[in-house]
Image: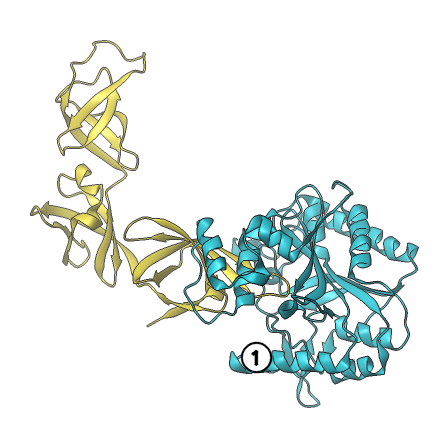
């Protein structure tokens, strides 16, 4: 199994701590002139997303995490798993709800997603940055009101909830930024 | 950093000019006090046995190895024992494996020794030195014993506690300590110092920490008492350690014991054995005058004077561009 010494630490390196894969966000070498050297690291748990501050003795080694990111196409969900295909070799893989996180609310089918694999198993799935979806529920629109800047709640065909401008009506298509679940613009079919 | 541009210096020309300006000021400081500037070898048959310093070793074509010094302390003490009187030196020193925002494996040290001084009197002179080179700070420094500093910032007395107090203090600050169980109490104290105590030191004025645990004496005298304390000090500005000073140990037998203990620690921890400096021990045997000495990190001083955040901003070419 590959391993890294703290001397090789840098942002972006993937390591295993306490059985979980982590991404190194920051690494700082700390040493009193006459004393023990440490590395002060900020790491993100790739399974839970939690960020930790941790100290390690310099020279310690940790196991490398075999984490890779891959482009995949969303196929369908069977209710328990979400199924994807690698467009290069047509191999399929299935991600569970934990790996999916917030992604399902943006998926209808055939979207190009990114999946992070740890030892070949899906760890996290990221939906495309922009999704075009139909508004299925919202209060009636205010005709002509395109300037006041007010917003209202809307439900989309995939079940996602976003704030939309007052002039948007049920049945319209909108473009949404999936990173922060915000309305971007009206969209055409 | 884009590999195409690493031929360029990482410091601005303004900072390099400031560096030259500070060099002039520090030469004038020692000139005015009648302290003799000396040069001693950077390459030596012996090295520092210190547990937490790693030396660069180079092959000697005449056989064996030579060590790049981690500080000029040993040959400077030989000069003192030979009757040099007050001396100072500016030079490059080398510490393997130390690289980061506040570390570079090769750095510039200002080291000086004052005959007839103890660590307290030398602290006052270091305060004057900082006053001249970092004039923006309040002139009156803060003085805290190691014990007071820990009590105030980490909430426990280091002479009456053990590992669990360190772990509790770290957790209380939201810091997850290392899992390894093989670190000694001094290692844990270093961790608490580096994470909690030292970052709080030296804001607006220099802070001196003095009277270290006897187990962290290095080359300082230990004053008997309960607990016995090392007559050693460090000084901090903006949470950054600038210097380390000692009321110098002059007892050859005690110095040999400390070297041997360091080498035993090195053996037990799989660290390289370093030949101890028999010339230093012979000089101590001859007679080291009563004196105090301090090693001051020049690059960090320039960094603070420039308002920079990292050494790379004041070094023409840090190690990764060297």
Q: Mark 1 lies on which chain?
A: B
Asked which secondary structure carries label 1, the reply is helix
Of B156 and B312, the residue lying toward us: B156
Colour yellow maps to chain = A
Q: Can residue B233 be seen in this view?
A: yes
Q: Which residue is drawn at 16% across and 27% down?
A: A155
Residue A86, horizontal then vertical, whole percent: 18, 55
Residue at (84%, 75%) from the top-left corner? B288
Compared across the picture, whether B140 is left or right of B197 comes to right
For residue B89, side relative to residue A111 (left or right): right
What's the colour of chain B in the image?
cyan
Which residue is nearer to you in this view: B101 or B74? B74
Q: Which residue ends up furthest to the front in the rendered image?
A: B226
Q: Quadrant of residue B204?
A: top right
Residue A31 visible? The answer is no
Left or right of residue B233: residue A106:
left
Residue at (12% x, 47% y) in the render = A75
The local crowd at label 1, few if under 14, some if 14 to 19, many if 20 or more residues have their Cα within 10 Å, is some
Residue B247 drawn above or below residue B29: below
Residue for badge 1: B266
The residue lying at 8 percent from left, 46 percent from top is: A79
Could you tell me which quadrant the C terminus of chain B lies in?
bottom right
Image coordinates of residue A124 in percent, x first then y, are 25, 50
């Amino acid at each position: 199994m590959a391993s890294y010494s703290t001397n090789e630490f840098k942002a972006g390196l993937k390591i295993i701590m306490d059985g979980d894969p982590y991404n190194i966000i920051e690494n700082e070498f700390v040493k009193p002139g006459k004393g023990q050297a440490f590395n002060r690291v900020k790491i993100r748990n790739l399974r839970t997303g939690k960020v930790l501050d941790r100290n390690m003795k310099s020279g310690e080694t940790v196991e490398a995490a075999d984490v890779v990111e891959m482009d995949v196409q969303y196929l369908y969900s069977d209710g328990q798993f979400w199924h994807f295909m690698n467009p290069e070799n047509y191999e399929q893989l299935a991600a569970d709800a934990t790996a999916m996180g917030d992604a399902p609310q943006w998926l209808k089918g055939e979207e190009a997603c990114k999946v992070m694999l740890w030892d070949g198993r899906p760890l996290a799935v990221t939906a495309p940055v922009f999704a075009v979806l139909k508004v299925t529920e919202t209060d009636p629109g205010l005709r002509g009101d395109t300037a006041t800047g007010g917003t209202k709640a809307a439900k989309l065909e995939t079940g996602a909830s976003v704030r939309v401008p007052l002039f948007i009506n049920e049945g319209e298509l909108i473009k949404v930024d999936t990173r922060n679940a915000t309305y971007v613009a009206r969209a055409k079919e | 950093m884009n590999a195409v541009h690493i031929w360029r210096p990482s410091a601005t020309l303004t900072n390099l000019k400031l560096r030259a300006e500070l060099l002039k000021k520090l030469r004038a400081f020692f000139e005015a006090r009648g302290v003799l500037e000396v040069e001693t070898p950077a390459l030596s048959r012996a090295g520092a046995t210190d547990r937490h310093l790693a030396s660069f070793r180079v092959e000697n074509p005449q056989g064996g190895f030579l060590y790049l010094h981690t500080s000029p302390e040993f040959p400077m003490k030989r000069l003192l024992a030979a009757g040099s009187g007050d001396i100072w030196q500016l030079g490059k020193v080398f510490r393997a494996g130390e690289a980061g925002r506040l570390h570079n494996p090769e750095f510039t040290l200002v080291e000086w020794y004052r005959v007839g001084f103890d660590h307290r009197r030398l602290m006052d002179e270091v305060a004057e030195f900082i006053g001249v080179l970092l004039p923006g700070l309040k002139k009156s420094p803060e003085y805290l014993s190691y014990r007071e500093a820990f009590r105030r910032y980490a909430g426990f007395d280091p002479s009456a506690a053990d590992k669990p107090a360190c772990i509790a203090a770290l957790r209380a600050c939201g810091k997850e300590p290392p899992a390894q169980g093989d670190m000694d109490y001094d290692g844990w104290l270093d961790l608490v110092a580096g994470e909690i105590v030292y970052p709080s030191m030296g804001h607006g004025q220099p802070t001196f920490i003095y009277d270290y645990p006897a187990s962290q004496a290095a080359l300082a005298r230990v004053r008997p008492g309960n607990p016995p304390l090392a007559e050693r000090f460090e000084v901090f500005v903006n949470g950054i350690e600038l210097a380390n000073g000692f009321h110098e140990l002059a007892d050859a037998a005690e110095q040999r014991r400390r070297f041997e203990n360091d080498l035993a620690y090195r053996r037990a921890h799989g660290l390289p054995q370093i030949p101890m400096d028999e010339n230093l021990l012979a000089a101590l045997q001859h007679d080291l005058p009563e004196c105090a000495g301090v090693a001051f990190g020049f690059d960090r001083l320039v960094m603070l004077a420039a308002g920079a955040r990292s050494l790379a901003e004041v070094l023409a070419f840090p190690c990764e561009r060297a």
